[in-house]
């Protein structure tokens, strides 16, 4: 915990991202492309595999936890990505 002015913040916490904020980062409405997995939000803007928000039959801007079962890969792919927030 760190005190900044009157606020006490936990520095280890990623910023809270709402479903509405996530939905706008679907690769169509804003330049950023974000996806959520198990409560974590990742930035895939730099990934050519997520260009325009589309990854095979899957769309960015949403929680894709349940959709991983359709993928030929495991959740190991998330280890390469940068977490930017937590889905609230
Ligand atoms: C038909 C379904 C899907 C196919 C064919 C597919 C295919 C691929 C392939 C070929 C790669 C690159 C090779 C690799 O890392 O193994 C990849 C990477 C990745 N996939 Fe999928 N995938 C699918 C669904 C999903 C879903 C549902 C998610 C999210 C839950 C997902 C998340 C990712 C991520 C985060 C990467 C890493 C991107 C990067 O490193 O730039 N994929 N996928």
Image: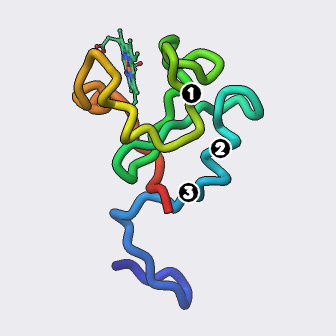
Rendered location of residue 15, percent (x, y)? 50, 60
- On screen, residue 84 versus residue 13, left or right, reads right
Question: Is residue 54 or residue 49 the one in the foreground?
Answer: 54
**Left or right for 9, reference 33:** left
Residue that badge 2 annotates: 23
Task: Pick the residue in front: 63 or 77.
Answer: 63
Q: Secondary structure at mark 3?
A: strand
Q: Earlier in the sequence, mark 2 or mark 1?
A: 2
Q: Position of residue 80 (x, y in %)?
A: 31, 27
Percent position of residue 40, x then y: 39, 49
Query: Viewed as shown, does residue 12 lie left or right of 21?
Result: left
Q: What's the CA distance linking mark 1 and mark 3?
A: 18 Å
On screen, 61 above or below 80? below
For image coordinates 48% across by 44% down, the residue present is 63
Callout 3 environment at 10 Å: few (<14), some (14 to 19), or many (20+)? some
CA gap, disc 2 and disc 3: 10 Å
Q: Quadrant of the N terminus?
A: bottom left
Is ligand 1 less than 8 Å from the beta carbon at label 3? no
- What is the crowding at mark 1: few (fewer than 14 residues within 10 Å), some, or many (at least 20)? some
* Residue 2 locus on image (x, y percent): 39, 78
Which label's residue is closer to the chain start, 1 or 3? 3
**Depicted 15 relative to depicted 2: above or below:** above
Q: Quadrant of ligand 1?
A: top left
The residue labelled by disc 1 is 59
Q: Is label 1 or label 3 in front?
A: 1
Mark 3 sits on what residue? 17
Instruction: Establish if 38 lies above or below 70.
Output: below
**Residues under labels 2 and 1: Cα distance?**
10 Å
Residue at the (56%, 27%) spot, across then down: 59
């Amino acid at each position: 915990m760190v005190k900044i002015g009157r606020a006490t913040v936990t520095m280890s916490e990623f910023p809270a991202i709402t479903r509405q904020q996530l939905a706008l980062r679907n690769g169509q409405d804003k330049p950023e492309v974000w996806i959520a997995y198990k409560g974590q939000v990742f930035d895939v803007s730099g990934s050519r595999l997520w260009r325009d928000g589309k990854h095979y039959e899957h769309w960015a801007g949403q929680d894709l936890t349940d959709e991983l079962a359709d993928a030929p890969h495991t959740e190991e792919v998330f280890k390469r990505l940068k977490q930017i927030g937590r889905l609230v």
